[in-house]
Amino acid sequence: MGSKKKIVRHVCRCFLVIFFVQILILPEFAFTEDKTSQRFDNMVKEAEKLRGAGDLVRAKEIYMKIYEDAKIEDLPEYRKKTRKAIWIIRKEEYKARLEEKRVQARKRKEEEKTRKEIERLEREKEQQEEASKKEKKRLLVKQVKRTYKEGCELHREGDYAGADEKFRQAQNEYPGYLRTEYFLERIPEDIKARDEIERKREEKNVEKKKTALRKQKERDLREKVKEKYQRAKKLYKSREQEKALEIFMEVQDLIPGYSKTEDYIRRITENANSE
């Protein structure tokens, strides 16, 4: 009888414990579980929001935290949900990396294309500049050649001043062109030699003029003497010996020993003495 009472009392105690557990502990546990679920739901919403905004790194971090916390809290539904979300994010990250690689590859390709285009344009520019330089040089050489030729022609003609001007122009435009420096050094000597030749020619011309003048005077004198001589001869033949003697004496003074002047003077003198 006493053991039955003990059993009854034990059963009553058990029911009381169960009652108190249901009244006090289970509601608290249920509240805690609801609170945990709400926290997980909020974290999931935040992760989804970040994922939608494209911030996969932070979203993945939150999902990983949810997964670890769900593992600790023994919430398999959240682990399953986050595992799938993490797998999707990794897949999206992989796609993003592939896309980034494709973008980088396109970027490198565009950069390479741009670089080659720039190099091509630079080569074309250099070629154009080189062609322009060659054309300028060709035109310059053509101009200098014409100037040099004009200088050579003037030098041959003896126009050393004009030649010097042309050669100096050629030297300024194209230093060292052909024999420009040689002519520039030679021209002062050529001018000096020309001046010396001109001086000698002038002296020779002066001498020629003097000789011609002297000869002209001699011819004039001979003409004058001849005329006097002939007139004296006529006077001598006309027996006008005094006048003839006077003129013969003038002839003798002008040109001593002219023709037979001395003979006529001697005859007239002898005739005068015999009379």
Image (cartoon, helix red, strand yellow):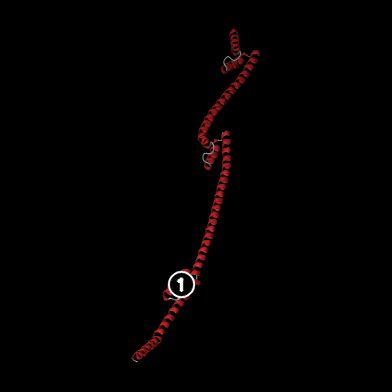
Q: Quadrant of residue 247?
A: top right
Question: Mark 1 sits on what residue?
Answer: 63
Q: Nearer the viewer, residue 121 or 234?
A: 121
Instruction: Please state which of residues 138 and 47 is positioned toward the viewer in this rendering.
Output: 47
Question: Where is 273 relative to 170, above or below?
Answer: above
Q: How many marks?
A: 1
Q: Label 1 amino acid?
A: Tyr
Label 1: state its secondary structure. Answer: helix
Relative height, residue 140 to residue 54 (above, below) = above
Q: Identify the image quadrant of the N terminus.
A: bottom left
Image coordinates for residue 273, horizontal then vertical, percent:
58, 8
Where is residue 144? Give x, y as percent.
56, 41
Residue most extreme to the left: 2
* Horizontal side, residue 67 vs residue 256: left or right: left
User: Residue at the location (56% across, 17% down)?
Assistant: 253
Q: Residues within 10 Å of mark 1 (few under 14, many from 20)?
A: many
Residue at the farthest top position? 274
Question: Farthest residue toward the bottom?
Answer: 1
Q: Based on the displayed image, in which of its 4 quarters is residue 223 positioned?
A: top right
- Residue depicted at x 52% and y 63%: 98
Q: Nearer the viewer, residue 14 or 50?
A: 14
Observer-nearest of 92 and 187 = 92
Note whether 167 is above or below 76 in the view shown.
above
The C terminus, quarter of image: top right
Residue 5 relative to residue 133: left or right: left
Q: Position of residue 235 (x, y in %)?
A: 64, 15
Quarter of the rendering containing residue 218: top right
**Image spot of residue 20 (x, y percent):** 38, 87
